[in-house]
Image (spheres, grey):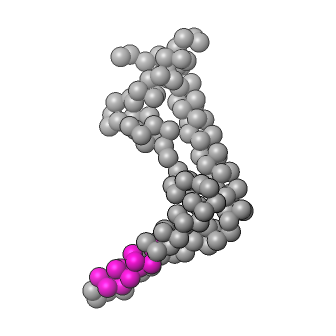
């Protein structure tokens, strides 16, 4: 398929705008839920710190296996608590997990070096406008 450069440029802009709007909607939803259930914000902060703790355990030297296992156990407990809080408030357990608009390409618009169908659909709409 040969692409018109002008249409391709607009397609890329629309695709980026769609992704940005999707990200913004997720962040707004996240902020709303955390304002309603402040413990979720604390849990997310702790989970982020635990990720850094794993890196620190590896860099510290020696055998980090037991430290990493402890960190993973704590992370699993925090994720479980997070899911419980969401469920108790009437939300799905994965409500604070951002999902891609397109699961095939992960919102990149490409699968390998080939344009994804989501990108091609935008291109066709833009081509029709042209």
Q: Position of residue 70 (x, y in %)?
A: 38, 82
Magenta residues, as a range? 65-75
Q: Quadrant of residue 73?
A: bottom left
**How many numbered marks appear?**
0
Q: Position of residue 41 (x, y in %)?
A: 63, 68
Q: Quadrant of the C terminus?
A: top right
Looking at the image, which is closer to me, 98 or 95? 95
Looking at the image, which is closer to me, 15 or 82? 82
Q: Is residue 112 left or right of residue 29?
A: left
Q: Position of residue 65 (x, y in %)?
A: 29, 82
Q: Quadrant of the N terminus?
A: top left
Residue 116 sits above or below residue 68 on the image: above
Looking at the image, which is closer to me, 80 or 12? 80
Q: Position of residue 114 (x, y in %)?
A: 34, 30
Q: Would you say the magenta stretch is mainly helix, strand or loop?
A: helix
Residue 88 sits above or below residue 26 on the image: below
Extreme residue toward the bottom, this view = 62
Q: Residue at 39% across / 30% down in the picture?
A: 116
Q: Residue at 47% across / 22% down in the picture?
A: 121
Q: Residue at 53% across / 50% down in the picture?
A: 98
Residue 101 sits above or below residue 67 on the image: above
């Amino acid at each position: 398929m040969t692409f018109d450069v002008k249409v391709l440029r607009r397609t890329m802009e629309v695709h980026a705008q769609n992704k940005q709007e999707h990200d913004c909607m997720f962040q707004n939803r996240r902020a709303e839920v955390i304002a309603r259930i402040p413990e979720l914000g604390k849990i997310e902060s702790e989970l982020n710190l635990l990720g850094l703790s794993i890196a620190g355990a590896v860099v510290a030297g020696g055998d980090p296996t037991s430290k990493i296992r402890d960190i993973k156990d704590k992370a699993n407990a925090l994720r479980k608590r997070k899911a419980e809080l969401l469920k108790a408030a009437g939300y799905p357990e994965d409500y604070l997990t951002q999902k891609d608009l397109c699961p095939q390409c992960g919102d990149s618009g490409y699968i390998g070096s080939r344009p994804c169908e989501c990108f091609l659909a935008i291109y066709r709409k833009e081509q029709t406008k042209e």
